[in-house]
Amino acid sequence: MVSAPAGPIPSSSLPLQIEALVKGFGQVTAVDGITLELRSGECLGLLGPNGAGKSTLIRSIVGRVIPDAGQVVVFGSPANSAAARAALGWVPQELALYPRLTAKENLESFGRYHGLAGTGLQQAVAWCLDWSSLQDRARELAKNLSGGMRRRLNMAAGIIHRPKLVLMDEPTVGVDPQSRNRIFEMIEKLHGEGAAIIYTTHYMEEAERLCDRIAIVDHGRIIALGTNEELVRNAFASRSQVLARFAGPADGVAAWVGRRGGRLVESTAQFAVEHPTEIAGLLDDASLAGLEVVDVSLRRPNLESVFLHLTGRELRD
Amino acid sequence: MILPIIRTAMVSLRRDRAALALSFILPIIFFSIFAVIFGGRHYTVPKITVIVVDEDQSRASQKLVNGLEREGSLVIRTRPESSDKDKDVQPPEYTAVTAEAAVKAGNVPVALIVPHGFGENPVSFGGKQDRPTIQLLNDSSDMVAWQMVAGLLQKVAMTSMPDVMAEQGSKYADQFVGGFTPEQRKRMDAGLAQLRQHENAATGSGDDTTRNGASGGGIIAVQTRAVVGENKKNPMVSFYAAAIGVMFLLFTASGAAGALLDEAESGTLERVLSSRVTMTTLLAGKLAFNTLLAFSQLVLMFIWAWVVFKLDFLDHIPGFVVMGVCTAFAVAAFGMLLASICRTRAQLGALSTLVILIMSSVGGSMFPRFLMPEAMQKAGLLTINAWAIDGFTKVFWRDEPVSHLWPQVSVLLAIGVVLFAIARRIARRWEYA
């Protein structure tokens, strides 16, 4: 039993309900009062930098972490209950495989651990090999597979029992762009078949492509939650971003950017403008302040901009 | 450029506590163990326990027994020790039959039976004669004890029975030379009286073990008989098959249990625990596998000993299976405990080397425990090695039935259960964060 005793368990059959979850490790609060719901068939992205608390949140859902407060409910059952375990599939960030077993043997082992046997097991293994495009490498030892193949096998091992809720913890870490695309296709297929998915990443593009809704996580808290468009609209309304770099003393640039209501991030000044025509006024003012413009660009805000806007830090800090 | 390399290596070594322990502590521990066993610390030299059955109860036989009792390197038993419950009730003295049974059971390595009629003709200066001979019953697995007792027996005959010997000598003079004159006879009797007086005085003063009389060979007729192992084709093979087998079993078991650490490190353990598998199930599964692995090793070792070294394997299969399974279980649990204590493979390697080599040396895997000082023999009982070797010795050496293995079986199973329970408790650290 992993959930802290924080009142009666909700009786709804939502794939996942998290209520005021808190988990600390020593002086560090990894998860700081997160409340979250996952809808049926939804793919929810947890977007945040390394150390934001995403993995701790995932491991709390799996039941591998005992929360200090709050509760986690999976399809109406507390986390780490037999029912929750059966309904959950977990793809950990690490390549949690048996290196000296073949791809097929790995899948068979994890299938048996989830209670599969006989024809059911063989069908599940065949489905997973097909899903991960590893049929022709089924008899290859896991340690001899390429990095991308091992990632795919790692994912397949997590869903061998065809769970209704899948937790994916940064499944594309360390893979090349081609393998990443293959992984995206796998996730989209799974999503298309109706599985509810929680997908953690610190890559904005992944969240934008795969997720129905995105929760931006920082310092153990969800600081924004919504669809991609909602997040951008809430942060920037209809405004666009102007990015400009200037030559000259850094102190002078910073002072001027501050006076103009902008933000200086890694020597790039960022401003939000309602209309592109406002750029001319900005540049004139910079010139009057004695700053020489090196380059300037206009861009539509994205999740990266939202994160920066909300935290003052780059997503990949 | 050599200095920076030395410096880097030193810093690395200093931070690797396991390697440091292996480099410095292990040699010191081993040196100490060997020094205690073979280093001539006389006050800890093992004493040989000998059962003496005096069927004769003559003056000569009693003197002989008293002389043996005064030997510092022997512990003479004429009756079994009283049980703890009935300390006041003295058990009956050993007989020839019970003494032989005690040697067969491995309770003592040597028994001496002084037969009826020994006192009438105790010593012999001539060739083979028709007279009662002392029976020396021995367990030939202990190659040292019986030879030492045989030598001491002759020495004691010389030093403890001078009057008897002189008397016997005069008898021989009477028989073969034609007798003494009355004057010679008178002097002889006076001399004998003096000898007795001197001997009584020596006994009374407690002067016992330090007399180093020349031990003449064959003064007392002794017939040596191995009551255990007399028909064995290759006496020490079964001992070493068990002794070396158990030591390597321990290494294999700790290595195999180390898979747990690999799985913890790779994240596989967490993934497994997120399925239907609980920590108890997982550890039990690994314990069962490691037990099977260890048992298979033992099977291979003993079959090799049978094929190559003529060990009588086929006649002892039930006993082997019982001892093999119990030993494998205890050893597997030991490996699980070590793996659960350690954080990394490197720690496990160092700790297992340290603990297993110490256990193996004290527990009799490197040299027989009967060579060790008594205290160390007792310390050996804290090891899996000692109990396993004792059990296999019972099976292959003493040909004892399976039912006689209950002490070894009980202890090994208890060790296995306790170690596994502790390992399970410690493994909680992997269960949840």
Image (spheres, rainbow, N blue to C red):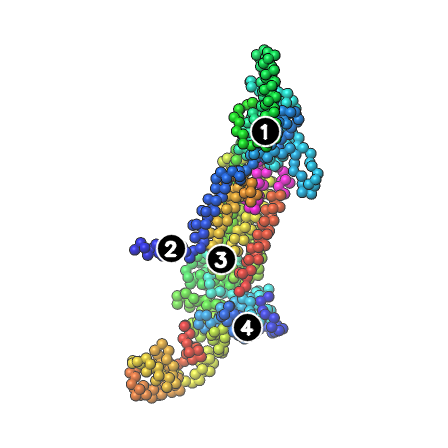
Amino acid type, residue under disc 1 in the picture: Ala
Q: State the predominant SS element of the stretch in magenta.
A: helix
Q: Does mark 3 fall on the same chain as mark 4?
A: no
In depth, the one of B412 and B138 nearer the eye is B138
**Mark 3 or 2, nearer chain start:** 2
Percent x, y of residue A273: 39, 85
- Measure how far apart labels 4 and 3 are at the Cα level: 30 Å
Give the residue at mark 2: B10
- Measure how far apart labels 2 and 1 are at the Cα level: 65 Å
- Measure how far apart labels 3 and 1 are at the Cα level: 65 Å
Say which element carries label 3.
loop
Q: Residues within 10 Å of mark 2 (few under 14, many from 20)?
A: few
Give the residue at mark 3: B343
Q: Depth-wise, is mark 2 or mark 4 nearer the camera? A: 2
Q: Does mark 1 fall on the same chain as mark 2?
A: yes
Q: Residues within 10 Å of mark 1 (few under 14, many from 20)?
A: few
In depth, the one of A42 and A254 nearer the eye is A254
Question: What stretch of residues is rendered in magenta?
Answer: B381-406
Amino acid type, residue under disc 2 in the picture: Met
Q: Depth-wise, is mark 4 or mark 3 nearer the camera? A: 3
A243 is higher (above) or lower (below) than B93: below
Give the residue at mark 1: B202
- Chain letter of the residue beneath label 1 in the structure image: B
In depth, the one of A282 and B145 nearer the eye is B145
Percent x, y of residue B43: 53, 39
